[in-house]
Amino acid sequence: QASPATAVGATDKYPTSHEQIQSPGNTPYFLNNKFVDSKTGSWIDLYDPATNNLVTRVPQSTDEELNAAVESAKKAFPAWKATSLLHKQQIMFKFVGLIRQHWDRLAASITLEQGKTFADAKGDVLRGLQVAETACGITTQLTGEVLEVAKDMETRNYREPIGVVASICPFNFPAMIPLWSIPIATITGNTLILKPSERDPGAAMILAELAREAGYPDGVINIVHGSAKTVDFIIDEPAIKAISFVGSNKAGEYIFTRGSAKGKRVQANLGAKNHAAVLPDANKNHALNSIAGAAFGAAGQRCMALSALVMVGKTKDWLPEIAKRAKKLNVNGGFEEGADLGPLISPQAKERIERIITTAEEEGATILLDGRGYKPEKYPNGNWIGPTVIVNVKPHMKCYTEEIFGPVLVCLNVDTMDDAIDMINANEYGNGVAIFTNSGSSAARFQKDIEAGQVGINVPIPVPLPMFSFTGNKKSVAGGGANTFYGKSGLNFYTQTKTVTSLWRSEDAFAAKANVEMPT
Ligand code: NAD
């Protein structure tokens, strides 16, 4: 079955500019390896954030469609579980090749629906692709342990799939985050129901098409759509045994609490407020460029964006230079040559962020660079805010206590590195942190004393590659972060352990009488 031409995400033609969507169609759902038009009466309009032109309509999947996805995944599970690991690995090799082949197409869908620049969207795809590439090593990653524990007796363990699992994704990485789940959940033998963000499902739809082409059997990967109603269905459906969630604290804490109460495994990565501490001995040029890139890239809509800057000692004098570098960034439609950052996801996000900037002013901070009111000439109707630098920020201010998720850098001043550590640790989030210094001993102490889970030393966005895990701490993960995404811990999340203890000996070597005591 060909992909439906109506779905922007699932055609082999892809846009190369913001003007190309002439007649928006509906995004289908994906069931049993087929794209299916939804029968819903409830649609979510999806607008290009750069123009606010309608791109596609996303269905709120009906109860029937949600149940059909569960049936499809349930039916596929036994045969998929029994499929040899080497066969699954071959499918993953092909999937990886197809993602590379369709890299531009995936990125274009992201630029159109999510807004980030085409170059940055390619990075979004790559980071997810790397999870799939790493999953190709499953034949060595999934080996168990075996030990002869007593005479003629050995214990060995296996990692077996859980069954039907679900993944609920945020808007900000439309390819990477579905790819945190798809490869690992499926190569370990589970069948998957994925709910992309209703704000940009196109990349996930393309991934479904590529998965089918790679040879995934019917029903192993299913895609449903919608918002809270679909999420509640996933939480309540007894056949779904595990939920992967990435998104805001509001949704994630709810999903974790309610999903756990229903006896499900839940892994949930949540919001953030990532700090950078700059010491006076830092390489100034590297620190300032890194901070500008990490604060304003993707219009600040990254969970690892560096959104809070802690200037130690005299480095506060460098703030005007940060504003100067931020001002040079080109804010434009994501398909435009030379664009550094694109628009915000929605008019509501723009308004919310503008309000936070205004509140900062009212609370006594200084707006050193003000991105409010900025509009690129060609796209006057987009959700724009230019890079914004707020200085003299104090920890009680709303611009510091809230995750802004926009191109806004809030800057605080302290006297010493110890003050910086205390301030950063007092923040309830703990996703990522960076320190810029040329002192090995300062870096070593910072690394030890800081509570955030992903530490960069002269590295602004220290997201671990998929051979490690994504390891946020504190309020940036639900449930204390016991179930982290990808890496060894990701494999553990998607598998349950079976331990087998066996005794093999010749008949005459067995005891003649029953033994009722525990062996000592
Ligand atoms: P979001 O929580 O609004 O949406 C995420 C998912 O939850 C979507 O699929 C959405 O449909 C669903 N959802 C939204 N509200 C819901 C509700 N009330 N009940 C049930 N389900 C609901 O998040 P977002 O705005 O799409 O993404 C941005 C957030 O995600 C930021 O807070 C960011 O820090 C976080 N994030 C975290 C990581 C990480 O690894 N820590 C990575 C990316 C994004």
Image: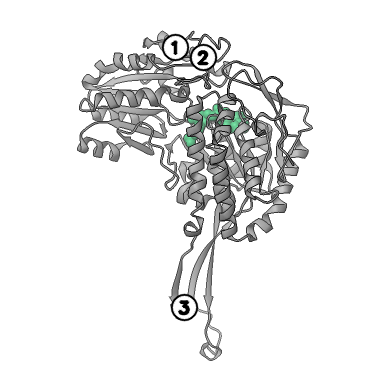
Question: Alpha carbon of mark 3 to alpha carbon of mark 1: how far?
Answer: 74 Å
Q: What element carries label 2?
A: loop
Amino acid type at image mark 2: Trp
Q: Can residue 47 be seen in this snapshot?
A: yes
Mark 3 sits near ligand 1, with its Cβ under 8 Å away: no
Residue to which mark 2 is pinned: 384
Give residue 482's position: percent from left, percent from top: 47, 46
Q: Which amino acid does label 1 sit on?
A: Gly
Q: Which amino acid does label 3 sit on?
A: Pro
Disc nearer the start of the sequence (3/1) = 1
User: Image height check: is 59 above or below 17?
Assistant: below
Q: Which residue is drawn at 58% across and 45% down?
A: 182
Query: Closer to the observer: label 3 or label 2?
Result: 2
Identify the secondary structure beneath mark 1.
Answer: loop
Label 1 crowding class (10 Å Cα cut-off): few <14, some 14-19, many 20+?
some
Kindly identify which residue carries mark 1.
371
Question: As rendered, which of 24 and 156 lies closer to the eye?
Answer: 24
Quarter of the image where one finds residue 58: top right
Q: Quadrant of the N terminus?
A: top right
- Point out the tag, 2 or 1, that comes first from the N-terminus: 1
Alpha carbon of mark 2 to alpha carbon of mark 1: how far? Answer: 8 Å
Q: Name the residue under label 3.
A: 519
